[in-house]
Image (cartoon, helix red, strand yellow):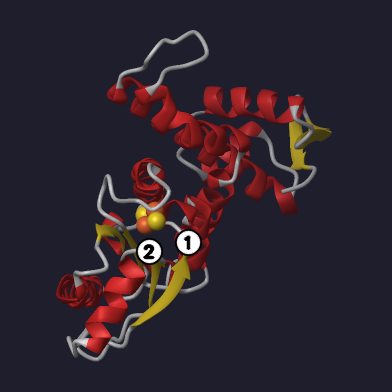
């Protein structure tokens, strides 16, 4: 991997990390040119969908930089970022891509040296991992596409955007949820939405039975059936025809 030069995207919040990167430049702290910086107003602007999209488009890694906890210009933005980051990692884990390819760091406007250190470390890490495996494996690329689709599902986005509030302030009845309880719920929803996205992707081009889908994925048939019931309710999949006694399904839109 000695000659591999990774393509890295870095989303930096305007008020801290971007200023930190600027300070690194002004102070002549060097960092590898592999990082392409995208300035965002707050780290919480970086959604799981954005990160997965960037990886799908060929980036080998993504670095997200924000203000230290408690210092966010928008008070609590980076607490939401932490929750979003957990979902990114969960989806990467489901796909089978190394979670180290996405890193979250708190870097203040005064930490130019830290920015340079993090950029060097991150580039070295991705160099050691090699190019993102989706470039060679069609199957992984398909899974990553499904993860991206799952990341923009209503259930997952709604849950992730409420996660911080549900833990700190509670729901409309004032009931607070434990962090770990909620994490388990979010992880389960991420898995379900990923599986539904996989089913939609596979049935986009051809009519498939539950057995066909099970043979093409690791999803058990009972789970596939229950996903199909839910997808039918949302008009996302329909029964096209029968093969013997087995209904064949096709995605209506994806
Ligand atoms: S403004 Fe920097 S993390 Fe929110």
Q: Residues within 10 Å of mark 1 (few under 14, many from 20)?
A: some
Quadrant hosting ligand 1: bottom left
Confirm or reject: label 1 Cβ below 8 Å from ligand 1.
yes
- Quarter of the image for residue 67 reads bottom left
Name the mark on residue 41.
Answer: 1
Q: 192 left or right of 122?
A: right
Answer above or below: position of 72 versus 154. Answer: below
Front one among 76 and 48: 76
- The x, y position of residue 117, in whole percent, is 15, 74
Q: Residues within 10 Å of mark 2 (few under 14, many from 20)?
A: many
- Quarter of the image for residue 113 reads bottom left
Q: Are marks 2 and 1 in contact (CB under 8 Å)?
A: yes
Q: Secondary structure at mark 1?
A: loop
Q: At 47% from the left edge and 61% from the top edge, which residue is drawn?
A: 41
- Quarter of the image for residue 209 reads top right
Q: Secondary structure at mark 2?
A: loop
- The x, y position of residue 188, in whole percent, is 43, 29
Front one among 247 and 50: 50
Front one among 112 and 231: 112
Q: If you read the primary sequence from the N terminus, does the residue marked by circle 2 or circle 1 appear first?
A: 2
**Residue 246 visible:** no
- The x, y position of residue 58, in whole percent, is 47, 74
Confirm or reject: label 2 Cβ below 8 Å from ligand 1.
yes
Report which residue position mark 2 lands on: 15
Q: At 40% from the left edge and 42% from the top edge, which residue is drawn?
A: 80
Spatial CA distance of label 2 from label 1 is: 7 Å
Q: At 54% from the left edge and 52% from the top edge, which residue is drawn?
A: 148
Front one among 78 and 182: 78
Answer above or below: position of 196 versus 52. Answer: above
Answer above or below: position of 240 versus 123. Answer: above
Quadrant of the rendering where the N terminus is positioned: bottom left
**Residue 114 visible:** yes
């Amino acid at each position: 991997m000695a000659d591999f030069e990774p393509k890295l995207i870095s989303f930096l919040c305007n008020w801290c990390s971007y200023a930190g990167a600027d300070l690194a430049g002004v102070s002549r702290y060097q960092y590898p040119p592999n990082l392409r910086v995208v300035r965002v107003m707050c780290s919480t602007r970086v959604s799981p969908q954005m990160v997965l999209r960037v990886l799908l488009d060929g980036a080998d890694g993504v670095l997200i930089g924000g203000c230290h906890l408690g210092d966010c210009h928008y008070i609590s933005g980076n607490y939401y970022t932490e929750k979003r980051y957990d979902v990114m990692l969960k989806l990467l884990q489901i796909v089978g891509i190394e979670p180290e390819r996405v890193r979250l760091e708190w870097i203040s406007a005064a930490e130019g040296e830290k920015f340079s250190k993090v950029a060097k470390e991150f580039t070295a890490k991705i160099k050691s991992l090699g190019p993102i495996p989706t470039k060679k494996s069609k199957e992984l690329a398909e899974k990553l596409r499904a993860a991206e689709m799952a990341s923009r599902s209503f259930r997952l986005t709604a849950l992730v955007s409420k996660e911080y509030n549900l833990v700190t302030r509670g729901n409309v009845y004032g009931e607070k949820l434990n962090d770990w309880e909620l994490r388990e719920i979010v992880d389960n929803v991420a898995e379900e939405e990923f599986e539904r996205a996989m089913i939609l992707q596979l049935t986009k081009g051809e009519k498939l039975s539950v057995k066909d889908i099970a043979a093409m994925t690791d999803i058990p048939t009972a789970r596939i059936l229950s996903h199909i019931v839910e997808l039918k309710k949302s008009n996302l999949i329909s029964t096209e025809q029968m093969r013997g006694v087995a209904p064949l399904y096709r995605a209506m839109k994806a």
